[in-house]
Amino acid sequence: MKYFLQAFAFTFFMYFGLWIMWVHFAIDIALNSEYPGSLVYLPHAARVICTCIFGWVAIPAMVVADFIGISFFVHGNTDFLLTGNFSFEELINSTVANSSVFLSLILLKLSGLSFNYEHGSLLLRKSNYQHIFLITVLSAFINGLFGNFIRQGISDLDIHMYTVLRFTVGDILGTLAVLLVCTIMLSAYKDLFNKSNKDY
Amino acid sequence: MNSFKKDLMEAIALVSNIENKLKISSLNGNEKIIFYSILIKERNDDNCIISDVIRVSKLSRSTVFKTLKKLESLSLVSLIQSNEDKREFSIKVNI
């Protein structure tokens, strides 16, 4: 139970923080009103990292973060939402999108690749950036194709293939951007830590 | 049940893995002093030799040698043997 709460809280704050940054700074990058879908969807990094680390526990935390974000922090432009507020359709959409990484892990497990020896013949490592990149690409395709298929099913929207492509590219670029910034921050933190250790 | 702290360390290990791949992992104090000494010497003069680095960095000969070997292994500098004196090396920054 303690692990669940810690994992839930960590995922919630990471996803929510990235979502707020995306809504305020990145949502307008390469905007195209005809074909929705952000080209730098930062919260996908939280989906990838948290689902890989904590498993299914991360999914409800991200759905709750979506609910709070959309209900209380979206003012003005609501073009990226299905109905303009957090409706039942948006809940389904959010659940499917946030499950994309978990679905990609299931797909990899079926193909013989898993984080556990018991489930797969080939072992994936959470600390290996190449394995995480594979999961990112796979989940971005699942979110782009399957997510938009569901979006079309639950709303009257006619989703163009170009929108699917924008979703996929946006998820990949968003994850890469977040991982790159985290890497630079870790490097700077190590420098500061070494400097402060020498001063004392 | 998994340990939260252990799982979180996996995320840090992932970022550290990218850091190593991109080669932006930080150099320690002496490595930075020696690297900057070579850059300063190269800016003033074309040819930089080990004695110049020792003089500019004010570090011991053994520290400079050891650190230069590490910088060379990181492909940050190249040590080129002199044609006239085989004991002498000129140092070039690779960036």
Image (tube, coloured by chain):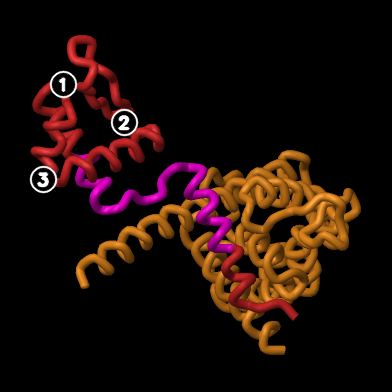
Instruction: Identify by letter the chain in red.
Output: B
* Residue to which mark 3 is pinned: B58
User: Which quarter of the image is occupied by the C terminus of chain A?
Assistant: bottom left
Residue at screen point 35% across, 33% down: B72
B59 lies left or right of B6:
left
Real-space Cα separation, disc 2 to disc 3, in angstroms: 19 Å
User: Which quarter of the image is occupied by the N terminus of chain A?
Assistant: bottom right
Q: Is residue B14 one of those drawn in magenta?
A: yes
Kind of residue at disc 2: Val
Secondary structure of the magenta portion, mostly? helix
Image quadrant assignment for residue B39: top left
* Residue to which mark 1 is pinned: B47
* Residue to which mark 2 is pinned: B77
Kind of residue at disc 3: Lys
Real-space Cα separation, disc 3 to disc 1, in angstroms: 19 Å
Establish if A86 lies above or below A132: below
Establish if B39 lies above or below A104: above
- Pinpoint residue B2: horizontal percent, then vertical percent: 71, 77
Tell me the element at label 3.
loop
Tell me the element at label 2.
strand
Kind of residue at disc 1: Asn
CB under 8 Å between callouts 3 and 1?
A: no
- Pinpoint residue A165: horizontal percent, then vertical percent: 71, 41
A158 lies left or right of A181:
right
B31 lies left or right of A189:
left
The disc, 3 or 1, on the residue closer to the chain's N-terminal end is 1
